[in-house]
Image (spheres, grey):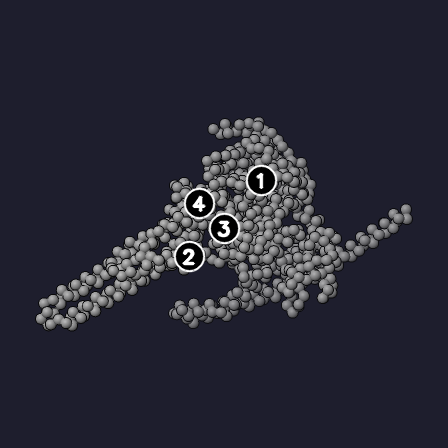
Amino acid sequence: MEREGRRDINTIVKDKEKEQEFLEEADKLKGVIEIINREILNYVKKRKDVSKYIVEARKKNIEQFEDDEDKIIEYFDHERYVKEETFRIIDKRLKEFTVLLSSPYFGRVDFNDEEYGEDRIYIGRFGITVEGSFAPLIVDWRAPVASLFYTASLGSAKYASPEGDVAVDILKKRQYVIKKGDLKGLFDSEVDVKDDILQMVLSENSGSKLRDIVMTIQAEQDKIIRQPRNKIVVVNGTAGSGKTTIALHRVAYLLYNYRKVLQDKVLILGPNQIFMEYIKEVLPTLGEEGISQETFVDFALDMLDLDTGDIMSTKNYMEFILSGNKEFIEQTRHKLSDDYIKELDQILKALNSRYEKGMSSVNYYDKEVISEAEIKELFNKYYKDMPLYRRNKKIKRIIFAKLKDARDERVRAIEKEYKELIKSSTEEELKLNRNQMAYKRKLKIREAVEMVMKIKKELTFLNKEDVLEVYKTINGEKMYTVDDLAPLLYLRIKLEGIKMKREIKHVVIDEAQDYSKLQFIVIKEITKCLGMTVVGDSNQRLIPLASDKVPMEELLQVFNEMEGELFKLNKSYRSTAEIMKYANKFLNNEGIVPLVRKGEKVEKIAVESDEKFASIVEEQIINMKNSGLETIGIICRNIDETKHFGNVLKNVQYVKVIDRENLIYSGGEVVIPSYLAKGLEFDGVIMVNTGKYDEEDKVSYVMATRALHKLCDVYINYSWDEIMS
């Protein structure tokens, strides 16, 4: 009884202490919001002053020099450029302050620094240091010291500063739930302060766009985000491990810490436009806009004499693969193999040999302008590191220059001979023969010029063959697929060289499990970047390979001259334990993915007709919506199923059918094929199981792992394709 009494007293004391801490934190929050409001007013005034200056300066320049366009252009001088850049920075900060008003910070770390003693920092989406103050009011989550918040436990830790690693002792970590400027809750932990918040966030609905995870970044994710910029970072993570968000947060981190180097020089490559639209709002919420995002197809076509109409669509490409077209699959395997790269190298070697064999001395009349040995020395020694066609172009210029010199020398000799003939002739001879002498002189000069033209035409070994024609030697007249773009770029790099229109210093590749080795090689060759962030899930590769190894996993061996590291993420944060357990049965590798939260049991329902299918799916959609789920994906294996079942459902329930990669996913209920759903997530998913695949099937794994909270597997127990026919 005495012990229970003590326990009750201790509980009361702890509750009072927590209540007091909550009130103190609420007062702290109130004070911070007041400071942010003052900063907003201050920046509004700054923006107004700068706007006034810009408007008046423009007006003054236009009025003063209205008749002098050059003077008006001079308006864009350094001083005014600085003013306009200042306006942009002020406007950006104002947007950040407005965001912070609703939730200024989400975390706090108390730590002991051996040099400076105890310190406390509050961490938010953006940082604030009030003018005149040296200590930050709020530390940006991307700042080096903020990494202390994302470590897994209290105690000894370190963070990377410009002067080197700083060792500290973490005393406390606290996380806040702040909404619309009000403190709703706070959590302390000796292990991982983010667990409670993480559960809360994961239980929320997904929405039609991917969201940032600054509040819930896990230690393993934070480690990847903060890797050095000049490094090949490869992330092979299971479905729902946060690969895409890690990659986007890494971009935000790199831009924050290396803005001068990387501004406007980051390229993000994604699988399709649906995916690009889905992720496009993450970086703006982190304060970064204007990042170049495109597909590999767009990237490649920008440097080839082709357009999208020349390339097989993703839809048709995937349909050939999913339908089991043996000839197409075998062709695909071959084009993605190391043997195909060897074939390309053999073509290049043969071209190189052909040009070299065609080389011979160049003679102008009886004079050797350049010897065969000299040409081969230029080809094999001085310019050997140049792409083949550029090498030939360089040699051509040298030969043509030497021919010009020889021609000019001959013309001078003709002129000299003519002048001497005139000088040695009598007046009578000149009267009779001057016109004929001049005509012969002109004829000889024309002959000298024509001889040069004739020799140039005969130098066929210097002519270049179109890259597309060269590629036909192994591809024939077959329609190009995405698998032909990397080989075409490779040939163009080796034959002509490629210079990008813009400078790229860091490349992010998402859904990288679908990339070939050659794709990685050409991206690296073309961009010349020293840093890459490559993320994907080898279990979600649907495109067949000649070997068991997904190229992404061997990327560090491909770029072995560069620093690199492979990270494996096995923990899924997207789906419930029940969904992941169900999805894992479709994999043929060992190990169940660790899970973080419980949910509803996965339902498996068999239907015997289209009418029954429509009825069951309608019932599932209604139940999901009634339970608060907002985004629902009815995921089919291929496009035929998508169109068929989309039409079946339209009779009873409004659904949007996404059957092309350029359509935009805007939430609600959609019917979509598996390969266009990759990378997306839905609150609820209805898998359409037509029984055309084995239990161990990556397509089914992709379909199942799109679900966050609810999964239903609807088995089609009838021949729906007969109905279609």
Pinpoint residue 298: horizontal percent, then vertical percent: 47, 49
Dot 1 amino acid type: Val
Residue identifier under label 3? 521
Pinpoint residue 676: horizontal percent, then vertical percent: 53, 42
Pinpoint residue 171: horizontal percent, then vertical percent: 74, 58
Dot 3 amino acid type: Ile
In this image, 187 relative to 708: left or right? right
In the picture, residue 111 is in which quadrant?
bottom right
User: Front-most of 488 and 555?
Assistant: 555
Q: Identify the residue at horizontal 16%, vertical 72% (top origin).
A: 423
Q: Label 2 to label 4, Cα distance in Å?
A: 21 Å
Residue identifier under label 4? 343
Mark closest to the chain's N terminus, 4 or 3: 4
Q: Identify the residue at horizontal 54%, vertical 61% (top origin).
A: 261
Residue identifier under label 1? 702
Callout 1: few (<14), some (14-19), or many (20+) C-alpha neighbours within 10 Å? many
Mark closest to the chain's N terminus, 1 or 3: 3
**Figure label count:** 4
Dot 2 amino acid type: Lys
Residue identifier under label 2? 384
